[in-house]
Image (cartoon, rainbow, N blue to C red):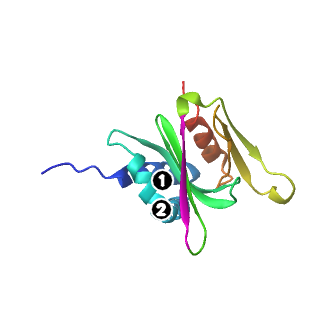
Amino acid sequence: MTNEFDPSDIVVEGLTAAAESAEDVSLGKDGAGLYAEVRQVLDVELRADDQGVVAFACINMSSRTPAFLLVLKDRAFLAWSKGMFRPKTTIESLSLGKVTQATVASGTGANRDATFLTVVSPGNEPWVLALPSKSGQFAELVRSSFVTS
């Protein structure tokens, strides 16, 4: 019996961590649904020794589309599909060792009910993501997952 590598196991680790941190099972369900849409481009990036730190569905504010975020121990991926009839799936990655800033802030004005994560890494456009939960514990888990010691 061989141990076949299944990238979805890594994603499930991250989805479980997100749902437990926010104490909201819907985070796992929503994330799993979006993962199914982007898994073709995401799975090829994963290795057998990767560990999922956190994973969930969010809103990518630069494209104004639902996106799937997966944070591993050493890097992070943001994947989303855009287009109704011929959707194009895009994936971006960041090395966590190059992240210079990860901040969480409450929205203002029309976005006052949202919590935003901004991740800055030289050489990349900043990631600005609307988080799916207003839980402070969840927001801190996500922010801290980008900060390497």
Q: How many marks?
A: 2
The kind of residue on which mark 2 rests is Ala
The secondary structure type at the circle numbered 1 is helix
Locate residue 48 relative to residue 58 in the image: left or right: left
Q: Residue furthest top?
A: 149
Q: Residue furthest bottom?
A: 85
* Depth order, front residue of 77/83: 83
Q: Position of residue 50 (x, y in %)?
A: 38, 40
Marks 1 and 2, how far apart in space?
A: 8 Å
**Crowd tier of the residue under label 1, counting other residues whose Cα lies within 10 Å: few below 14, some 14–19, many 20 or above:** many
Locate residue 89 relative to residue 130 in the image: left or right: left
Q: Position of residue 78 (x, y in %)?
A: 56, 49
Provide the residue designation for mark 2.
32
The disc label shown at residue 15, or none: 1
The disc label shown at residue 3, or none: none
Magenta residue check for 53: no
Q: Position of residue 63 (x, y in %)?
A: 68, 57
* Depth order, front residue of 13/79: 79
Q: Position of residue 116 (x, y in %)?
A: 71, 48
The magenta segment? 86-95
Magenta residue check for 87: yes
